């Protein structure tokens, strides 16, 4: 195996389409690995990530900030998990509301300007409705600083931040700017006790160009990804061996 870099950032996103929380470690679960914290036997990856979504309370359609202007305000919300596992949503005024707060839907509706509810993406026995996600979430999403720098090289004015791309794991690489993850597809990656198999590139959508706190709207970012790497930035992976990854851990890829 060859060393390709170290873990720079780790993220979890309890509510889909909403900002997440930066962590110092992640315990990544394998399919059906209930002891590792997977909430659903059909799910592997980061426990608790994207377990909730926002939806239109009148149409029951899930939030789609990548294609609908009225949902762009989702990018100005954040989410986190409490120690007891309850998801919370943070609002621009600095207040937080747990997923089971009686006034949460009123707060969400006031934020968006239309009726908005919170739903689970899979049934776990809670009191929330279950709404089918717009897409099937991959178990793990990985991005490198080399790929981000490749985008910056094509548009030096870009304000790049991992928050635009919603990775679970950001890897700091020492290689020149370039889409290095492309070469990992089909290969094994080992980080600490975690082993994964890289499966495919990550197709990008309109969320990458949208404004969010501290990041302006920048349409050229998506154009650069389209031209430079056929709309891919980062990679998806399946879990081969569950394990813990921590900030600063070395990342190894099969030679």
Image (cartoon, rainbow, N blue to C red):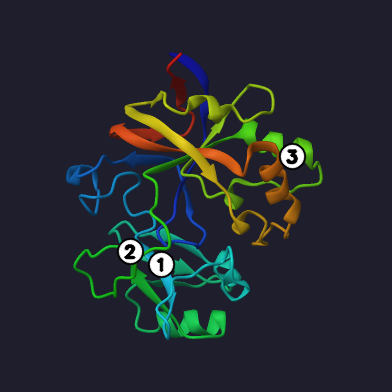
Residue at 58 percent across and 63 percent down: it is 66
Q: How many residues crowd mark 3 within 10 Å: few (<14), some (14–19), many (20+)?
A: some
**What is the total number of numbered labels drawn onto the structure image?**
3
Residue positioned 54% across, 68% down in the render = 74
Q: Earlier in the sequence, mark 2 or mark 3?
A: 2
Estimate how packed mark 1 is, as few (under 14), some (14 to 19) or many (20 or more) residues with alpha carbons within 10 Å: many
Residue 151 position, x and y percent, is: 71, 39
Q: Could you tell me how far apart the alpha carbons at marks 2 and 3 are, in whole angstroms?
A: 34 Å
Q: Where residue 169 sits in the image (x, y, percent)?
A: 48, 39
Q: Are marks 3 and 1 in contact (CB under 8 Å)?
A: no
**Residue at image x 38%, y 74%?**
118
Image height of 101 relative to 225, above or below: below
Image quarter of the N terminus: top left
* Residue labelled with disc 3: 152
Residue under numbered circle 2 = 121
> In this rendering, is residue 90 above or below 139?
below
Residue lying furthest right in this view? 157
Q: Which mark is residue 112?
A: none
Q: Is residue 92 above or below residue 31?
A: below
| Vertical placement of residue 235 versus 22, above or below | above
Residue 53, labelled with which disc?
1
Q: Residue at x 32, y 35 (%)?
A: 239
Quadrant assignment, res 35: top left
Image position of 152 (left or right of 52): right
N-terminal of the pair, mark 3 or mark 1, is: 1
């Amino acid at each position: 195996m060859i060393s390709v870099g170290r873990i720079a950032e780790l993220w979890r996103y309890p509510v889909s389409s909403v900002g997440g929380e930066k962590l110092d470690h992640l315990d990544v679960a394998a399919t059906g690995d209930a002891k590792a914290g997977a909430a659903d036997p059909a799910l592997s990856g980061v426990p608790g990530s994207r377990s909730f979504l926002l939806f239109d309370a009148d149409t029951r359609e899930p939030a789609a900030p990548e294609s609908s202007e009225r949902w762009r305000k989702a990018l100005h919300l954040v989410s986190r998990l409490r120690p007891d596992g309850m998801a919370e949503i943070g609002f621009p005024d600095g207040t937080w509301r747990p997923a089971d707060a009686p006034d949460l839907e009123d707060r969400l509706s006031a934020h968006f300007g239309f009726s908005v509810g919170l739903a689970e993406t899979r049934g776990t026995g809670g009191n929330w409705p279950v709404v089918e996600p717009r897409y099937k979430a991959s178990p793990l999403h990985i991005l490198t600083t080399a790929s981000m720098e490749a985008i910056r090289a094509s548009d030096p004015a870009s304000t790049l931040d991992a928050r635009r791309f919603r990775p679970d794991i950001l890897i700091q690489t020492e290689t020149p700017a370039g889409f290095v993850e492309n070469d990992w597809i089909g290969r094994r990656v080992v980080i600490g006790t975690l082993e994964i198999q890289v499966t495919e590139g990550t197709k990008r959508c309109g969320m990458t160009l949208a404004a969010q706190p501290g990041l302006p709207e920048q349409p050229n970012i998506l154009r650069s990804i389209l031209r430079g790497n056929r709309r891919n930035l980062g990679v998806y992976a399946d879990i081969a061996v569950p394990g813990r990854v921590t900030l600063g851990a070395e990342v190894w890829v099969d030679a």
